[in-house]
Structures are given as C-alpha cells and as structure tokens.
Image (tube, rainbow, N blue to C red):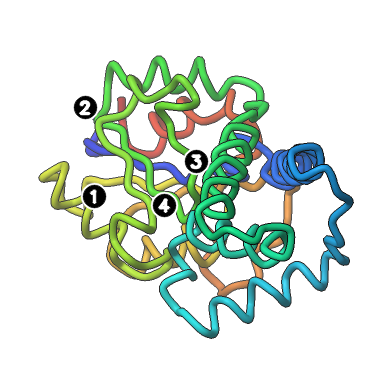
Amino acid sequence: MSRIQLITFDLDDTFWDIKSTIINAEMNSRKWSEDRIGEKIEWGTFEDFMQIRGGLVKEDPSLEYDLGMLRKKTIAHHTKKFFKDTKDLNEFIEDAYNFFLEERHKVTFYDDVLSVLEKLSSEYMLGVLTNGNADVNKLGIGHLFDFSISSMDVKSNKPDKGHFVKARELSKVDFRDTLHVGDHPVNDVLGARDLGINTMWFNLNNLNWEVDKKPPIQFNRWSQFINLVESTYGS
C-alpha cells in the first residue's frame, strides 16, 4: 500500500508550456485592445513591459501574488490616455482582462498529463498549488482535484510555506504522507522539501540539478510518473 495519500501539483510548465501560452495570450490581447480602441498602442519592448510590472510591484508589493490586479494595472498603464471617462476606462480594463484570462487558459497539455491525472484521481487525493492564475475549472480538469490553491488564496508565492500549509489544512494529510510535483527547483522542490514533504521534479529538458548536492527524484515524461510513484512509495 502506498504511503502517499495526497499528491499536489504545480501547473505552469508542469502540465503545459507557459511561455508559448502567455506569448499567444499577450499578442491576441494586444490586438483585441487595439481593435476595441481603434488606435495603435505603444506597447514597448519586453524589457519595457517587465520594467512597468516591476515598478507597479514596488509601489504595491501585494501585486507580487495578485496577478489579476497586476495585469489590470498594466493594461491601464498602456490605455488610460485613450479614455476621458473613468467609468469607460474601468469597463475597458475589465473586458480586456477577461479576454486575456480566456486566452491564457488556451493551453496545450503535455503528452499523457490528462490520462495520468484521470488514473491518479481514483487512487489518491489530488491538489493544485500554483503561483499563477490558471483555474483548473476553466481548463475542464477541476473534477480531477480535491482542491486548488493559488497565491491569492494564501497571499504569498511558493517557495513560501503558505501553499503547502494550506494544502495540509484542507486535506488533513501530514507532510510526510504528501508528494509535491513541479518543474521549479526552488519554488516546488526546495519549498516542499524544506517542510518534510516528498518531492518529484518534472525536468522536461533534462537540466542538471544545481541547487544543492541532494538531487530529487525526477522524470521528464508524464508516461513515467505513475510507475515512478509506485516504485518509490508503493502501490
């Protein structure tokens, strides 16, 4: 019998590639905004984009985990000059944000993710721990999970302990009987391991483990995952 009762998962770059997803969402959202306003918008470079976001977070540190509000303030930064009426601007920001969010959920799952989750959901308690704003219900996979915890729920980002402690609170499963799986060496692996949680590293690109001298159990294809869990923790 497996000694693992709960398996928690990261989302972005664990179940799908986030870079291509966000680039597509960003480009489509910019076109939507320009079509709606009827003007070309000076978006600037990627460096400009990140500098704007960094400045907003410096002004309001809660935006570090409130990605929705950060997105809305970024939209406002680029578009407020086109609106004389605050009500019209706020309405536009909400519509633009909702369009972006819809585009952000157009993901392409890595091979075997869905079939693996289907099988696991009948054998284990499953949870999501994400620093992002993807919603498993919008993705059509919410029924496979017992809970989903975002940074907004705990007002912090992994590797801080908030997500992990909340998962223990919701599941009533001890850390020693929990397995956390994710792509990020620090946010996922170290964050969980430092609390005594079992970990596996989804290492799609076969990177070297350079964080410390204790490399975690790792895999690079989801087809390997169930056998790896069973061979490591029992079935």
Q: Amino acid at mark 4?
A: Thr
Residue 134: image tag? 3
The residue located at (30%, 25%) in the rendering is 235
Residue 41, position as x, y percentages in the image: 84, 56
Can the viewer see residue 217?
Answer: no
The residue closer to the viewer here, 151 or 1, is 151
Q: Is residue 19 above or below residue 165?
A: above
The residue closer to the viewer here, 211 or 66, is 66
Of marks 1 and 2, which one's residue comes earlier in the chain? 2
Residue 43: image tag? none
Q: Amino acid at mark 3?
A: Ala
Q: Is residue 118 above or below residue 183?
A: above
**Closer mark to the observer between disc 4 and disc 3:** 3
**Closer mark to the observer between disc 1 and disc 2:** 1
**Residue 38 position by quadrant:** top right
Q: Amino acid at mark 1?
A: Ala
Q: Is residue 127 above or below residue 155?
A: above
